[in-house]
Amino acid sequence: MEGNKKKKKSISSFSILFIILIIIFIVSKFLDGQTFAPVVPKGAEEAVSAVVGADLPTLVMAPYNGFVDAIDISIFVLVLGGFLGLVTATGALDAGIQRLVKNSKGKEVFLIVVLMTLFSIGGSTYGMAEETVAFYAIVTSAMVAAGFDSLVAVGTICLGAGAGVLGSTVNPFATSVAVDALRGAGYESDWGIILPIGVILWLTTLVICIYFVVKYAKKVQRDKGSTLLSLQEQEDMEREFGSHTEKELEFTGKHKAVLLVFAFTFVVMVISLIPWPDLGVTIFDGWTSVLTGTSFGEWYFAELAMWFLIMGIIIAIIGGMSESEIVDNFVAGSADILSVVLIIIVSRAVSVLMQNTHIDALILDRASNALSGTNTIVFVIGSYALYLFLSFLIPSTSGLATVSIPVMGALAANLNMSPEVMIMIFCGGCGLINLVTPTSGVVMGGLQMARVNYTTWVKFVTKPMVLIGVVNVVILCASMLIF
């Protein structure tokens, strides 16, 4: 069954990212001095209007500057690793996953559908992306124990949350930032146009993603030889996540208490990240700031890191650990997840280098000029393709919206087209490419957590991405013609 699988090492995620860094460095040299029309944010007096060729120190310092830029999520992920190390040391996670799989016998596929739907809701409402890193360990363990492979877990999390981000409705890091950027350019947006298109993009993409993940999961469950994982990846999967299937574990009252606190920790995380003030909800005002000084709806990685630290200590106490055991298990858990932090840092270095050289602004200027005067269908397709490319260079939705929407939204309005649809073109293109781009710390970090090679993920996700892209373009073209 495994005879056709080659035991080979694919190029590492780190190597892929460093190659991209070097390519950007070389391209910036060739484009040095190329001028463009700069986007000047409100309150800014001047802006660089030409590409700046990167020198050697800029390239060398890019990873360090990427670390500085990503310090908040890096600390969160390290603390998360320590938290998971404490939970794992109690034995509750292994016993709980075994009980979950046993109780869901014959309904494992339903578990995939439910999880993908929940992740997509988080993606559409508050831009759940980096936060998904917290779920890879437990979901991968559960999927492997259920008879699937680690690729099913990555698909469940990455495509689930990604479908929601692609069809962002009230996502403060995508639609809200884009609306604000468009307002800064002098154009007000109609949420009555944005929300329906977002819902349609979200649900159609989710259905496509669920179909492909479930289809693959069923095939792997029937025949382990049909997995896309290489032999090396299968060995890594068994070593990291296969312990839940080895023997019957006792599920004690202490385990139940640990898992209740564990679940409560994640519930609070989700609730704290939803932008309640933007939704006009005031129930969480004031009293939820007691612990961190910041109310729910305004929490981010700093608050989350300290929340997981506190809850990890509480779980360790429930588990009966001594002071030295708490420290040792926390440090060991952080060490296990260090590679994910390093991946995020190098991924962010690519974005930092792009911003420093202004290649992104040059591409945006040239593309907007090329799209002027085209018909509606060509304009939508060209804009969507532009955002696919720009999102590869700038995986941050908020950063890309701030840079591009004043240009592309204004261009749409000047051509008597809907700037609101342009916002959803941005969401669609950015959401699609962020399912696979190696410059995204979310993608690369998640793959590292699940021990899946980047090339394997690309092989799995190519077909659904093509179908999603076609469906997206049809919906967006129809929307632009209607509005």
Image: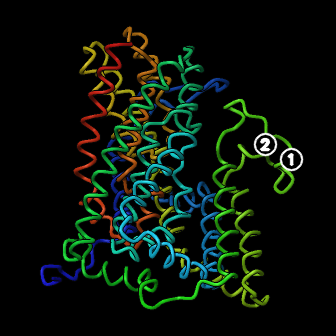
Up-down: is 269 above or below 476? below
Q: Position of residue 287 (x, y in %)?
A: 86, 47
Q: Nearer the viewer, residue 26 or 127?
A: 127
The residue type indicated by label 1 comes to: Trp
- Label 2 neighbour load within 10 Å: few <14, some 14-19, many 20+: some
Residue at numbered disc 2: 284
Look at the numbered disc 2 and give the secondary structure of its residue. loop
- Is there CB contact under 8 Å for labels 2 and 1? yes
Please indicate whether residue 116 sits to the left or right of residue 306 in the image. left
Look at the numbered disc 1 and give the secondary structure of its residue. helix
| Quadrant of res 78 | bottom right
Up-down: is 301 above or below 180? below
The residue type indicated by label 2 comes to: Phe
| Quadrant of res 179 | top right
Q: CA distance from mark 2 to mark 1?
A: 7 Å
Q: Nearer the viewer, residue 111 or 276?
A: 111
Residue visible at 68% across and 51% down in the picture:
300
Up-down: is 46 above or below 149? above
Residue visible at 40% across and 40% down in the picture:
430
Figure disc tally: 2
Q: Residue 287 bears which disc, if any?
A: 1
Q: Position of residue 433 (x, y in %)?
A: 35, 46
Residue visible at 41% across and 45% down in the picture:
163
Please indicate whether residue 82 sits to the left or right of residue 416 in the image. right
Q: Position of residue 164 (x, y in %)?
A: 46, 43
Please indicate whether residue 368 sits to the left or right of residue 259 in the image. left
